[in-house]
Amino acid sequence: MKKRNLVLFTTAAIALIGSVLYLILDHGDRTFSWLAFGLALAGAALTLLPVKTKLAFAPLLPTALYAAAFGLVLRAALPSLSDVWNGVNFIGGNATLGMTFAGVYLICGILGCAACFMNSSSADPS
């Protein structure tokens, strides 16, 4: 298996597992975003596009969706995080879970960016 495909599948697995945990653990909280959940799932599904096609920009599509999911989760979690910083419980929400899942989608975005710069035409030397 090519290194780029391995990185893309690892990223998709992290996004899928993270999204399922995001739905289970954070669904009823203020830091949950259905749009971010859907973007992460769509990014994991779009991982098949760079694997099945020879388009040079194909790894960029799931990466953009992971980055958008990161931004949405971070935006939803920041008011709860400000409560933690200020020592009050004004807005509510679980800032820890919000930051955790923002971190998961950030990792997916970083791995996706790394896959964008990997060569897809060379065979794996090992």
Image: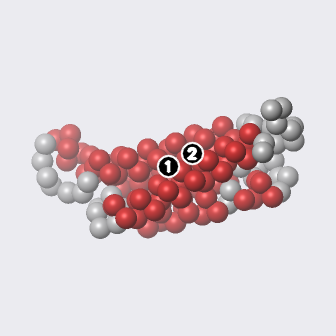
**Is there any visible trace of residue 95 in the rendered image?**
yes
Lateral position of residue 62 relative to residue 33, left or right: right
Provide the residue designation for mark 1: 105
Pick the front one: 115 or 25: 25
Q: Quadrant of the N terminus?
A: top right
Image coordinates for residue 45, horizontal then vertical, percent: 64, 63
Give the residue type at disc 2: Gly
Q: Is residue 120 above or below residue 52?
A: above
Q: Report whether 13 appears left or right of 5.
A: left
Residue drawn at the location 61% of the way across and 47% of the way down: 10
Tag 2's secondary structure?
A: helix
- Rendering coords of residue 76 (x, y %): 35, 56
Callout 2–callout 1 Cβ contact below 8 Å: yes
Left or right: where 117 falls relative to 16: right
How many angstroms separate mark 2 from mark 1 (CA)?
6 Å
Q: How many marks?
A: 2
Residues packed near mark 1 inside 10 Å, few (<14), some (14 to 19) or many (20 plus): many
Res. 68 in view: no
Q: Nearer the viewer, residue 100 or 78?
A: 100
Residue at 34% x, 51% y is 98
| Residue named by callout 2 | 109
Disc 1 marks which amino acid?
Tyr
Residue 76 - label: none
Specify how the rendered protein is coloured. Answer: secondary structure
In which quadrant will I find the C terminus? top right
Q: Residues within 10 Å of mark 2 (few under 14, many from 20)?
A: many
Q: Residue at x 53, y 58 (%)?
A: 16
Image position, residue 65 (x, y; %): 58, 55
Q: Residue at x 52, y 42 (%)?
A: 107
